[in-house]
Image (spheres, coloured by chain):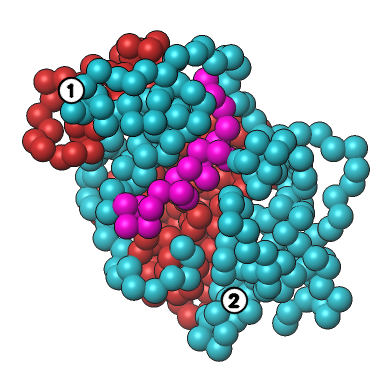
Amino acid sequence: MGGMDGFGRVVREPDEPIFQERWEARVFAMAALALARAPNTDAFRHAIERVAPEAYLRDGYYGRWMAALETRLVEEGLLAAGEVDARLRGEPAPGAPGRALGLGGEGSALRHLDSAPRFAIGDAVRARNHQPHGHTRLPGYARGRRGTVARVHPAWVFPDTHAHGEGEQPTYAYAVRFDARELWGAEGDPRASVIVDLFEPYLDPDPSGAPT
Amino acid sequence: MSGGHDHGSDPRALRAEALESLLVEKGVVGTDGIDAVIRHFEQDVGPMNGARVVARAWTDPAYRERLLEDGTAAIAELGFGGPQGEHMVVVENTPRVHNVVVCTLCSCYPWPVLGLPPAWYKSPAYRSRIVREPRAVLSEMGLELAPEVEVRVWDSSAEVRYLVLPERPPESEGVDEEALAGWVGRDAMIGVARAGAPGSRDE
C-alpha cells in the first residue's frame, strides 16, 4: 500500500502489549507452528493478499493472518473447506484427513547460484511495469521507475513462482534506490529516497543512465 | 485450548478458538506448543536484544565495523538470530543521513532483535505514508529532522530485515555498555525516534 492516500495519521500507543487480545496470540502461534510444518512463507503471504479488501482492513493484522492460515490449511488438505464454520455452528465437521505433513522447517530462502548477478552497485536500472494477478514483491509505486543499485543481495527463492507452486527459481536481488521525485513527481522530497529490495526479474538496465 | 478466556462476542476470538480446537484434534498443533511460542515472543525476544547490539556498536568500534559490514554475523555474535533475522542489514544514522524502515507490502520486521512489530508499524497509515512523505510522518511521530538531513526509507520487500543504528546521544558520554542499552528504544531502531535517556521516550 506504499504511497496510497487516505489512511490518516500514524497512531502510536504507549505501553502497547505484544498482543492486544489473547486470540491474536493464539492465531500468531498457530500460524507459526503450522507454517513450520507446511513451509511456504510466499504462499502464506499470497493468501494474506487474497483476503477480501473489506476484510483486509476490517479484521486487522492477526485477522488477516487467521484468514490466510485457514486458506493455506485448506490448500494443504489439513482442513476441509467450511470446517471451521461447521465447528462454530456446533455441527460435526465435514472432516479433512489431517494428513501428516513432512517436517523440515522452511529455514532460509538463501540459495547458491553459479551464475553471477546481472547488475552491480551503481548500475542504472528501471523496474518493470509488471502487473501480475498473483503474488509479487515488486511494490506498485516502484513499477516503471528508474533507480540505482545500492546493494547486491545474495540469491533467494523467487516469491512470484514459489507462492504458486511453480518452484523456487532462485534469483539475485538488489537494494535499488529511487529518488523521491522519481517516485512521487514534483511533490517528492528533494532530500529523500526510498530503497526497495527487488528481485532480478523485476529489473531492466536503464540505458538513459541514473536519475539525477 | 483458549476456552475460558473472556473474549466477549468478538467473532474473530470465537473463530480462533474453533480453529484451534480443530487443529489440536487433528494433531497439527499442540496446546503446549502454542503456549511456548507465545511465551517466546512475549518474554524472550524484543527490543532489548537489538538494544544490546546497538550498545555494543556504540562502545566497540571494531564491532560497529563488523555490524555494518555483515549484520547477520555480527548480531549472531551476541546470540541473536533465527526466523525473520536470517539476512540482517544494519544502516547507520549520522548527522547527515537519517534511515527509517518499513514494509509496505506486509509488515516484515526483524523478530530476533526487535520482537514482533507494534500496531502502528503494521498500520495502513504508516505503510502507505512513510515512503511518500517521510519527513511529515516522522514529525507527527515527534521526530523533527533538519531540512538538510537526507532521509532514506528502506522498504523491506524481499528477505533482508533492516535495523537502524541510531546516533549515540552526546549526553550518554561515559555511560557503560550495559547501561547504554537502556538508552536504545524500539522506535530508534526502526528510525522513527532518536535514542535517549531511559524514561525520556514515549514508546
Question: Which chain does red denote in the image?
Answer: B
Give whichever of A100, B81 is nearer the camera: A100
Is residue B112 part of the magenta span, yes or no? no
The three-letter code of the residue at mark 2 reads Leu
Residue A128 visible, this angle: yes
Q: Which residues are magenta?
A: A37-56
Q: Can you identify the residue that label 2 sits on?
A: A183
Residue at horizontal 27 percent and vertical 54 percent from the top = A58
For mark 2, name the chain: A
The three-letter code of the residue at mark 1 reads Gly
Mark 1 or mark 2, whichever is nearer to me: 1
Say left or right for A123 vs B160: right
**Colour in which chain A is shown?**
cyan
Q: Mark 1 or mark 2: which comes first in sequence?
A: 1
Residue A57 visible, this angle: no
Secondary structure of the residue carrying tag 2 is helix
Q: Can you identify the residue that label 1 sits on?
A: A90
Q: Quadrant of residue A86?
A: top left
